[in-house]
Amino acid sequence: METLSTATELEWLGWTFYAGSAGLVLLGCYALFAARHALRLLLGLFLLESGVNLFLVAVGFRPDAAAPILVGEQAGSMVDPLPQALILTAIVIGVGVLALGLALAVRVAKEEGTLDLAELGRRLAATHTPATAEETLPQSGRTETP
Amino acid sequence: MNASVLMIALPLLAAFLLPLTGPLARWVGPFAAALNIALGISLWQTVAQEGPSVVVMGGFAAPLGIVFRVDTLAVLFATALAALVLILWPRTSADPRRESALLLILLAAGCGLAFSGDLFNLFVFYELIAVASYGLVAASRERLAAAAGLRYLVLSALGSAFALLGIGLVYALAGTLNLADLSRHADALNSPLGLAAFALMLLGFGVKAELFPVNAWVAEVYSTATARTTALLAGGVSKLALLIVLHLVLLVYAQPAALSLLLTLGLLSIVSGQFAGYRAADLPRMLAYSSIAQLGMIAAAFSVSGEAGVLAGLALALHHLIVKPALFLVGDGWPKCVDSLAGLGRAEPWRAALFVLLALSLLGIPPLPGFWAKLLLLKALLGMGEPAWNLAAAVVLLGTAIEGAYLLRVLQTLFRGTTNAKPATFGGALPAGVLGVALLLVMLAATPVGGALQRAAQQAADVPAYVADTLGGSPQ
């Protein structure tokens, strides 16, 4: 890392973190508002989460500090360890939710034959309008019995 | 070990040991929930005698360490959630073991959320609740349940990312995430950027709290998930999300701009929810929209600074926690379309009578508890003495009028004409009956219940005591 040794250059690195996180967040938001396919939406979500995580890293970044790991006797300042602990948790949660979302998407694709969430929303809205609701007998449709 | 920690550790332990319990599996969950209620009651007595306490984790004092704050409000929410989980425990299920595990995780995370005194811990427990609720929603056998679950997951995960961004901004501005410490540094957040952080967190936590711009999932999920899951989400989980909002406005964002933002979102929820409820043609959707409006009222109550707002919001929250799950359970198994309900009042008199009782309390007819909750809300809103809050009181009254129009339409349909349909199975008779009896008990014991809520609100609104308890009066 000889090219990034001076303080000003390292400070510049901190700002690229902020710029990168803003870019990722905006890209993720764009994907979430423009896309309708579940896989694209989940990808957009992942970009957004990465941007947020990078933002947290940037918050704790200090240009003149080392990584917050104690190795033997060590003096000098370290970057703020708290945001790093936070994003570890946030990354794990994000991966878990993404995996669950993909599993649900597989099930939806098998059941409905589409992953277009806008189309699925239309189908959900159409299920219970009076025109299509053909409910004559009270069935135990919503109980837990199989 | 403190009972508050056990209330999280035991359900979590039970959830992960569930696969090993063999034939006992179906009893583990209800037992853990009952144990949580017992722990909650013992904590309630401790708090009543000794006042609020702070549990420090891992030997690091606040603000560096993670703390639990055990006060009346937290104990009340944790115990109420455990009671709701126990009452709504599914008797039969397609996959009992997995569903039990999800319910136990939801219970543990809910208790953790109630006790957390730290913004990031609140977020983690909120996410844990969210993940458990995705699974519960998708476990329904109703057509399109998985589709509703997927749409819910995408919206909710988007909200969570926003909330995390807001939390990051708070940390960047104030340098701490401990609520008591943030309360001391509230000035650092009194800026446009600080307000933006609040707005992001409101959008994020507002997904579960069914707040205005992020509640599109509510009607879809509530009309496809099982009645018990719906009851749990509408009754318990939404209140816990609002508890985070309450912590934020009480301790950190007491600034007028933040309160106005919360009031605006609450009022928009009321108006949009009541109008959508009026237009809804089927019962689960109507109840879902009514739930949005009711939670909007709680948000409006929390936007009133001081004890009156907390008291009104608490009364509304507990009332809704009893009434709305019971309404969903009573309506479960009936035809979904409101027009097909005709004659059921005569065919199933007891069930219809329970529905009438619950609907009238939801509306706020005088001797029932719902009336006192709405009266407290109006008093709190008018007590602010500001034009926006006076307008809010008018909006609440207008909303109640619309709510009356559509709820009375259902009641009228129930007792009109006759039906030749066979009486439907009332799968939720026991839990709905228990909740109905609880409502009547609250009505009869209105004075002591009101006194207890008043003490809880007083304690919650006492911010200097909260800060001193948590930080041990350390120098500024």
Image: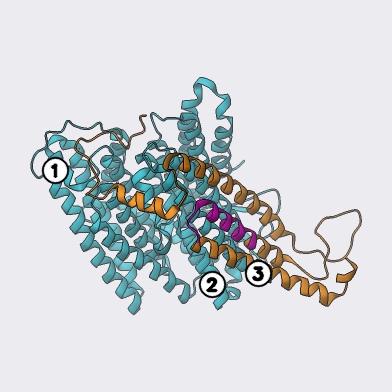
- Give the image location of residue A21, x and y in percent: 66, 66
> Is the C terminus of chain B in the top left, top right, bottom left or bottom right quadrant?
bottom right
Amino acid type of disc 2?
A: Ala
Stretch of the chain drawn in magenta? A35-51
- Pick out the residue farthest to the top: B23
**Figure chain in orange:** A
- Image mark 1: chain: B
Of tags 1 and 3, the one toward the viewer is 1
Which residue: 47% across, 72% down? Answer: B258
Q: Name the secondary structure under disc 3.
A: helix
Q: Please, what secondary structure does the residue beneath circle 1 have?
A: loop
Subunit under mark 2: B
| Colour chosen for chain B | cyan
Note whether B80 is above or below B215 in the view shown.
Answer: above
Q: Is residue A142 magenta?
A: no
Q: Main secondary structure of the magenta part?
A: helix
Circle on res. B342? 1
Q: Quadrant of residue B386?
A: bottom left
Using the numbered discs, state the Cα–Cα distance from disc 1 to disc 3 in whole angstroms. 59 Å
Q: Which residue is mark 3?
A: B172
Q: Amino acid at mark 3?
A: Ala
Q: Are marks 1 and 3 in contact (CB under 8 Å)?
A: no
- Residue at 62 percent across and 62 percent down: it is A52
Horizontal and vertical percent position of residue B445: 29, 47
Display coloring:
by chain
Write down the residue under mark 2.
Answer: B196
Q: Label 2: few (<14), some or many (≥20) within 10 Å?
A: some
Seen from the viewer's position, the closer of residues B321 and B276 is: B276
Residue drawn at 65 percent across, 52 percent down: A91
- Chain ID for label 3? B
